[in-house]
Image (tube, grey):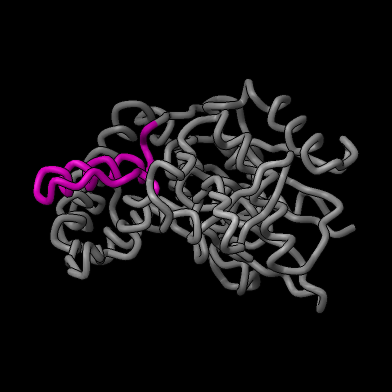
């Protein structure tokens, strides 16, 4: 069975699959979607059609005018986009997947059935060929199988058995408890607005204030990664402002953990950070001295664990659980 594991986030979309040579491949795409304008003159070969509508996806969607973009900011837009993205990935890879494993944030757990049905109906797959898991569960299983490095699973690192898994996507931060190596219900939470959407909003405010330009949230997410903004032929270095925002964001994350989960952290071996925003947070810790000191002051040197390819921990786990 050819499985596509897909972790659609508000900032980026991660996929894991086996290529024709039976190698496990991880890929990341910017979560971007736009309706294609049909000029009747030019044909855009990068488009994909679903339900009679033609769309542009990923990077290509972010370079059209903002009023043509579909902002992926809530469950409804996520639900719309997921099967479109799958069709686009199949077209780009020239592959057909006959099973899909996807995930939803704990903050959207009550929408699981609707998400499952959307994928089944839009792609014409049997119901038992589509699985929808809670985000974080994939990351837990990847860590259980591979520890902190899926590419070096026989490393000497001793896996934690009692920890909190902190899955930070673009919009949500999910917190899951693990006791004895297994999922536990003693601490489960989904916090909206705690991912890179927090950073993107600050960057949007900065650009609007200083350049009088109102960029979309999707474009802001891209700029957080690129750190450079090309505006009408001028390249603006965003590193100074993003570093300052990084200090504020790290402070927000630490304060949230301490205020909401201090009791749960007390008897744990550590915290396991996964997700695309954890990758950005790790960059802030490594590159900004103030952030490194902040985390050291609160958690010491060994309590924070951020795996290699942490952004793919959910999609890798989805693929393992779906196989």
Left or right, 134 with respect to 284, comes to: right
Query: Could one spot residue 169 in this view of the protein?
Result: no
Task: Out of 52 and 80, give the one closest to the viewer.
Answer: 52
Asked which quadrant contains residue 64, the reply is: bottom left
Magenta stretch bounds:
193-218
Pick the quarter of the image with the N terminus. bottom right
Q: Is residue 197 magenta?
A: yes
Left or right, 101 with respect to 143, comes to: right
Query: Could one spot residue 95 in this view of the protein?
Result: yes
Asked which quadrant contains residue 223, the reply is: bottom left
Task: Out of 294 and 248, give the one closest to the viewer.
Answer: 248
- The percent coordinates of residue 176 (x first, y second) are 54, 35
Residue occupying the point 57% across, 37% down: 78
User: Is most of the magenta stretch helix, strand or loop?
Assistant: helix
Residue occupying the point 22% across, 64% down: 232
- The percent coordinates of residue 76 (x first, y second) are 57, 29
Q: Please, is residue 305 above or below residue 178 in the view?
A: below
- The percent coordinates of residue 173 (x first, y second) are 44, 37
Q: Is residue 183 magenta?
A: no
């Amino acid at each position: 069975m050819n499985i596509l594991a897909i972790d659609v986030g508000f900032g980026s979309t991660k996929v894991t699959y086996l290529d024709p040579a039976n190698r496990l491949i991880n890929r990341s795409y910017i979560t971007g979607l736009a309706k294609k304008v049909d000029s009747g003159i030019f044909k855009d070969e990068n488009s994909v059609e679903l339900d009679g509508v033609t769309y542009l996806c990923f990077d290509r969607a972010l370079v059209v005018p903002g009023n043509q973009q579909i902002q992926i900011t809530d469950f409804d837009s996520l639900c719309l986009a997921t099967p479109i993205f799958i069709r686009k990935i199949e077209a780009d890879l020239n592959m057909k997947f006959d099973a899909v494993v996807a995930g939803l944030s704990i903050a959207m757990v009550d929408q699981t059935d609707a998400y499952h049905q959307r994928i089944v109906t839009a792609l014409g797959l049997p119901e038992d060929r589509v699985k929808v898991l809670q985000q974080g569960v994939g990351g837990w299983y990847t860590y259980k199988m591979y520890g902190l490095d899926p590419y070096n699973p026989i490393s000497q690192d001793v896996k934690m058995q009692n920890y909190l898994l902190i899955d930070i996507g673009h919009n949500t931060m999910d917190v899951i408890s693990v006791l004895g190596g297994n999922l536990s219900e003693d601490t489960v939470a989904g916090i909206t607005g705690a991912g890179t959407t927090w950073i993107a909003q600050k960057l949007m405010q900065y650009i609007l204030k200083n350049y009088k330009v109102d960029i979309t949230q999707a474009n802001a997410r891209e700029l957080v990664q690129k750190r450079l903004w090309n505006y009408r032929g001028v390249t603006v270095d965003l590193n100074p402002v993003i570093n300052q925002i990084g200090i504020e964001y790290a402070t927000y994350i630490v304060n949230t953990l301490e205020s909401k989960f201090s009791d749960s952290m007390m008897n744990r071996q550590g915290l396991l950070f996964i997700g695309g925003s954890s990758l950005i947070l790790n960059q802030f810790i490594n590159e900004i001295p103030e952030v490194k000191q902040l985390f050291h002051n609160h958690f010491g040197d060994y309590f924070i664990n951020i795996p290699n390819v942490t952004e793919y921990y959910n999609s890798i786990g989805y693929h393992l659980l779906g196989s």
